[in-house]
Image (cartoon, rainbow, N blue to C red):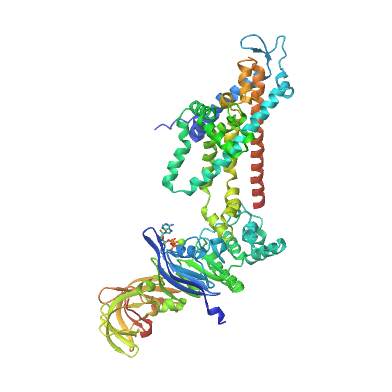
Amino acid sequence: MAQEDLPFIRIEAVSKSFGTFQAVKDVNLTIRKGEIFALLGGSGCGKTTLLRMLAGFEDPTAGTIFIDGQDMTGVPPWERPVHMMFQSYALFPHMSVEKNVAYGLKHENMTAEARKTRVREMLDLVQLTEFAHRKPHQISGGQRQRVALARALARQPKLLLLDEPLAALDKKLREHTQFELMSIQERTGVTFIVVTHDQEEAMTLADRIAVMDRGQVKQVGAPTEVYENPASRFVAGFIGSITAFPATVAQLSGDTATVAVPAFDTTVTARAVPGLVEGQSVTLAIRPEKLTINAVKPDLGNAVAGEIKDLAYFGKDSLYRVLLPKGDLIQAHAVNARRTAEARPDWYEKVWLSFEPASAILLTE
Amino acid sequence: MAAPPKDGKLAQWFHRRGWQDMIIGIPYLWLILFFLFPFCIVVAMSVATRTPTAPPFGFGGENPIINLAGYARLFHDTLYIRAFLTSIVNAAGATLLCLVVGYPMALGLTRVSKGSRNILLMLVILPFWTSFLLRVYAWMGLMAKNSWFNGLLTDAYNFLTPAAWAVKSIPMMHTNFAVVVVMLYTYLPFMILPLYANLERLDRTLDEAAMDLGSKPAQVFRDITLPQSIPGIIAGGLLVFIPAAGELVIPTLVGDASSPMIGRVISDEFTAASDWPMASSVAVALLLLMVGPMMVYTHYQSKAEGKAAEEQK
Ligand SMILES: Nc1ncnc2c1ncn2[C@@H]1O[C@H](COP(=O)(O)OP(=O)(O)OP(=O)(O)O)[C@@H](O)[C@H]1O
Ligand SMILES: [Mg+2]
């Protein structure tokens, strides 16, 4: 177990420029063996570029990549223990499914019999045995995606790079394939790096997530860590929804901070973050599901007065937009635990919002 | 208000799909008028009998209605058999050389930046802007016994080979070699352009995928690029081979008069020998010889497509 915790991939101070444009800026990452690691970020933030540098299609302008302790500088793609599943799958159109999967194996020193067995195993793994003799244009998008996965896994790479593997699939197939990917990872033990711009997909799949913005890695951590303790407003806003307000630290006592929030027209308590000083300007951010909507003012804890401005009923839950005393809007989320309409706040109703001190996020950045 | 008059059948057809049919029909009309109809005349002439009249052939009278003597001579007279063989060998040689020279050029065109690509494509078709005859005469000048070009090659040859093999000049003019070289030069764009069109459409990520799976660039070319460019190779090959096999001007100007190509034979039969039925027989045979391989190819391709459709079930 201890050995598995050793960094398997080290990306050290890697940058990549195209002309004067910097697509990747000073990225440092370590990825452990057998991990599913997600690169999450908006369009054009450099995810594919980083992946292509790992696969060897682009050389970093600066910095070094180590895979399994070996410096990858100058190692061509065909000599790297890395396989990539392309955003467009890149199946060979003139070869059958079987030949596609077998393609990488011809460079492997193995008997024809062993090769055949491996191809059959791979097709079994992705449940495509009956389509072995079809050409890529004769199967569905989801099946193509599985062929691409089988082809990338056939040579038993140490590292598998997946560039938006599920982007082309519909919602249901995507959810199904997510679990399939996870179970394949468990069975094969291969390290996965998955690129995605879908935060839910990253949270479902990954052991750890790196959030990227304009070529830089903003935060790395487990899904819960990144969601509950975002390091910056960008990360907080990118993963899940959040409402943020400017605030000032009024008083510090132990790990509790009292902050004055002009938009709330009152002070609230929140869990202090290290390095906070009294009088400091901060941002108080709170996620919709951390708020409770009350008809009367609660006796204890943080309470903010408001008026329901807007509501969206989704069936199992509802989303409210609440007008605050100074005219700002805050989002609140409530589970519809009761069937009757009287139990739910209605339009223009005066309400009190409450939240626990630990639920509010103080951001200094 | 009176009801609008009901359209007649013809007008109805015209409104529904008449335009479409007419526009599709125009090329066919062209082909019928300027290919099928003249070809029928040639076929008719090929079975006529040679007479001393003008025009120099006739049917009926004391002659048989259908006279197959011309076709029979194709198989007996070695002149025709040799001419067909020379044509096929020369055309095949030119096609092969065009492929060997043109493929790297076409591939190179797909690998340069968009801006220089247009300039290079222009250069490929630039020779068409000068008269074809002028360019053949230029080659005649180059290959002549006492030209600087021939002198250069002669010096290089004499330098590289033992003194006993020394020559005064390299005999290039009036050989089949000269015919192949000039045809290579003339038809090269017809190979490059379809190949370029084919190669340019190929997805470069497939090359990366193959490299990713362990193939070196040469293997990527063999496994990925080459198989996908076969339609381009066939298109370019047909565009070079068919006109090259029937070529008249190049063999007449630079070729070996003692082993003529088939185009020269047809021309001689029409003019010098004034044997129109024989000339027509040779022309029909040439056409059949060209159409044969194309039919085989089309048949093979539609069969492959049918098989693919079969597998889909
Ligand atoms: N070959 C190139 N030449 C110039 N600029 C490039 C090149 N490749 C990528 N870029 C630029 O680098 C930036 C990052 O591109 P990249 O493909 O890595 O984005 P991405 O995060 O994968 O986005 P998406 O989610 O849309 O796939 C983009 O702004 C892109 O325009
Ligand atoms: Mg991308």
In the rendering, at what x and y percent does residue A321 appear? 34, 72
Residue found at x 59% / y 72%: A183
Number of dots carrying numbers = 0
Q: Is residue B2 left or right of residue A183?
A: left
In the rendering, at what x and y percent does residue B145 appear? 55, 27
Q: Considering depth in this image, is B104 or A113 the residue closer to the camera?
A: B104
Residue B310, visible in the rendered structure:
yes
Residue found at x 57% / y 63%: A79
Answer with the quarter of the image where residue A18 lies: bottom left
Vertical order, A144 against B185 (above or below)? below
Residue found at x 67% / y 22%: B281
Q: Residue furthest front?
A: B163
Task: Report the quarter where the N terminus of chain A lies.
Answer: bottom right
Answer with the quarter of the image where residue B29 lies: top right
Task: Report the quarter where the C terminus of chain A lies.
Answer: bottom left
Q: Is residue A116 left or right of residue B200?
A: right
In the rendering, at what x and y percent does residue A197 appear? 45, 66
Ligand 1 quarter of the rendering: bottom left
Residue B197, visible in the rendered structure:
no
Q: Considering depth in this image, is A28 or A189 the residue closer to the camera?
A: A28
Answer with the quarter of the image where residue B166 lies: top right
Q: Is residue A314 left or right of residue B68?
A: left
Q: Considering depth in this image, is A259 or A25 the residue closer to the camera?
A: A25
Q: Is residue A244 left or right of residue A167?
A: left
In the rendering, at what x and y percent does residue B123 appear? 45, 38
